[in-house]
Amino acid sequence: MLLKTNLCGMKLKNPLILASGIIGVTKASLKSAADSGAGAVTIKSISRERRKGHEPPIIATEGDVMINAVGYSNPGIEEAKMEFLRLSEVGVPVIASIIGKDAGEFAWMAKNFLPGEFSAVELPLSCPHTPGYGMLAGQGTPGATLEITKVVKKQTKLPVIVKLSPNIQALGDVAKAAEKAGADAINMGNTVGPGMFIDPKARKPVLTFGFGGLSGPAIKAIAVRCVYDVYKAVKIPVIGTGGVATGTDAAEMLMAGASAVGIGSAVHYRDVAVFGKIAKELSALMKDEGFSSVKEMIGIAHE
C-alpha cells in the first residue's frame, strides 16, 4: 500500500518504471522486469522500418559512468506488432515507445503501431547519438516538440509521455510546449552528453560510432536538477529518469517533483532484480521518515 501510485490513469504497485532501451526488446524481457518488481515497463523504441543500429561495441563503462550509442536498433513496426501481443500477461502497465524522423512519421507510427493493449505511449525527442532522430534531428526545440506532440495526440487516445533531454538549455520552455500540445506527462530525461572514451592502446574511441550518451549513477545530480526545473514549469506529471540506482536516489527524484521514477542503467549495476531492491529501500526510507504515501513525497523539496 505504501508505494502504490497512479500515473496518467495507470495504477502502479510502485513508482518504478523500466526505462526504454534497456531490456524491453521482447515481451519476455518486459515480464522479467515486472516480475522483479517494476511498477510499469517501457518497450525499446520502435521505428517504421527495421534498424540495424550502430556497429558494436555500442556500450562501455568506466566506474559510475556508462556511455552508449545503440542507434535505435529494432525490428521495425511489423515484427514489433507480433512481439507485443497479449500484454496483459506482463502483469504491469506497458508503455510503448515510438520514434520518427519528423512529425509526419511520428503520426504514422502512432496510427499504425499502437494497439489497445498498451497503457501509454512515449515520444523520445532526446537521443543524442542517432543521426536523423532526437536531438540530431532538431526535435528538442519548443517548436518541434509542440508539432510532434500535437500530431500524435490526434492519432491516439493513449496518454502521451514526451521524453526530454537534460542537454536542453531552455528546458522549461520545451516542457511547456509539450504541455500546451496536450502531453499527459514529461519523462525527464535521457542520457547526457554525448561523451567519449578513448582506448590508449588502440588509440581510438572505444565505441565504434565514436561518441555516446552518458548514463549511470554519475549523472543523477543533473537528472534531479532537471526534474526540479520541469516540475516548476508544468502542471502535468513528471517521470524522473537518470542515474537512479538506490531507494535514496528514487526518493530524491520524488522530492524534486517526479511522480514516478525511470530505472535504466541500474539494471547493469545491480541486475534486473534492481526494481525489487529499490522498492524495498524506498519503502524503508519512507517508513523511517514518516511518509505514508508516494504522493506525500512528490515535490516536497520545493516547499
Image (cartoon, rainbow, N blue to C red):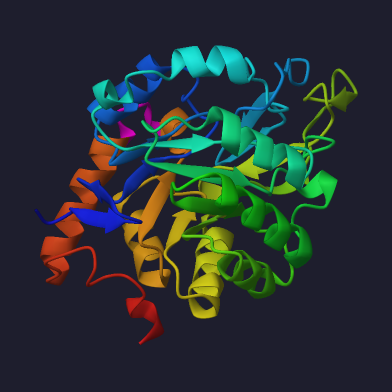
Which region is colored magenta?
Answer: 270-274
Q: Is residue 266 left or right of residue 125?
A: left
Q: How many marks?
A: 0
In percent of the image, x 32 and y 19: which residue is there? 86
- Where in the figure is residue 172, as x and y percent of width and height? 63, 74
Q: Give the dominant element type of the magenta stretch: helix, strand or loop.
A: loop
In percent of the image, x 55 and y 59: which residue is there? 223
Residue 249 lies in the magenta stretch? no
- Is 114 placed above or below 136 here? above
In percent of the image, x 23 and y 49: which residue is there? 11
- Is 47 placed above or below 185 here? above
Give the camera-side residue of 34 and 95: 95
In percent of the image, x 72 and y 72: which residue is there? 170
Q: Is residue 204 left or right of residue 50?
A: right
Residue 45 visible in the displayed image: no
Q: Is residue 258 left or right of residue 74?
A: left
Quarter the C terminus occupies: bottom left
- Where in the figure is residue 268, as x and y percent of width and height? 47, 29
- Where in the figure is residue 146, as x and y percent of width and height? 69, 62
Q: Quadrant of residue 9?
A: bottom left
- Is 137 placed above or below 2 here? above
Q: Is residue 284 left or right of residue 197?
A: left
Residue sticking out furthest to the bottom:
303
Q: Quadrant of residue 294?
A: bottom left
- Where in the figure is residue 302, as x and y percent of width and height? 40, 83
Residue 50 visible in the displayed image: yes
Give the camera-side residue of 35 and 243: 35
